[in-house]
Structures are given as structure tokens and as C-alpha cells.
Image (tube, rainbow, N blue to C red):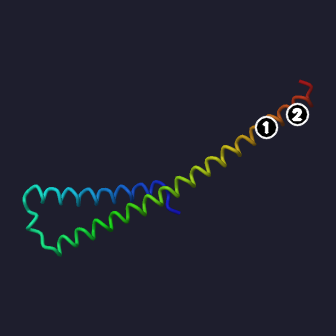
Amino acid sequence: MVTLEQAEHSLDRAFGRLERALNHKLAAAAGGNRAAGSSADLARERDALMRDVAALGAECERLRAALDEARRENQNLREASTTVARRLDGSIAEIDRMLGS
């Protein structure tokens, strides 16, 4: 299972790649270098960006699943701790009654 930290790290890396690609593209456009890139270069950049977007989508889904699982586990732990607390309170009360306190 992918841990939440691993998924967040992968998402950060994918965002970084996307940000670098966009910054590169914006810098090239600002410098008037639009015509400098061949259509093959542009197609490669577009394909790389599309892969990054797909990776981001996959990471988001994994993060959602990990978060949902963490929420379910948290709820289960709350329920279990409530049950244990009630049982302990009941046991302590019973012991007190047995000891005549």
C-alpha cells in the first residue's frame, strides 16, 4: 500500500516537473522564441505535460484513497477506544462495589 507520505512526495515531484515545464515554456514565449521550437519539440513538450497531468491525476486518486482509508481507521479507533473506556469504567465501578468503596 502506498503511504500517504509517499503519495504526497510523488505528487510534489509531479507538480515540480509540471511547474518547471510551464516556466520553461513561458520564458521561451516571453523571449520571442516561439518560432525557435520545432513542431516535434512542441509535441514532445505537450506529451510530457500530458504525462505529468495524468500522473497528477493518478496521485490525486491515490491520495484520496489513502485519506479515505485513514479516516476509516481513525473512526474505527475512536469507536474501539470509546468501547474500551466504557468497559474500563464499568470494571472499575464493579471492583469498587466488590471492595465496598
At which x and y percent is residue 49? Answer: 28, 65
Label 2 neighbour load within 10 Å: few <14, some 14-19, many 20+: few
Residue 62: give its label: none
Spot the residue most to the top.
101
Can you say which quadrant of the picture contains the C terminus? top right
**2 on left or right of 21:** right
* Secondary structure beneath label 1: helix
Which sits earlier in the primary sequence, circle 2 or circle 1? 1
- Circle 2: residue type: Glu
Is 50 in front, or is 95? 50
Look at mark 2 in the image and give the residue it sits on.
94
38 w.r.t. 16: above or below: below
* Secondary structure beneath label 2: helix
Label 1 neighbour load within 10 Å: few <14, some 14-19, many 20+: few
Residue 88: give its label: 1
At which x and y percent is residue 51? Answer: 33, 68
Residue appearing at x 49%, y 56% in the figure: 64
**22 on left or right of 4:** left
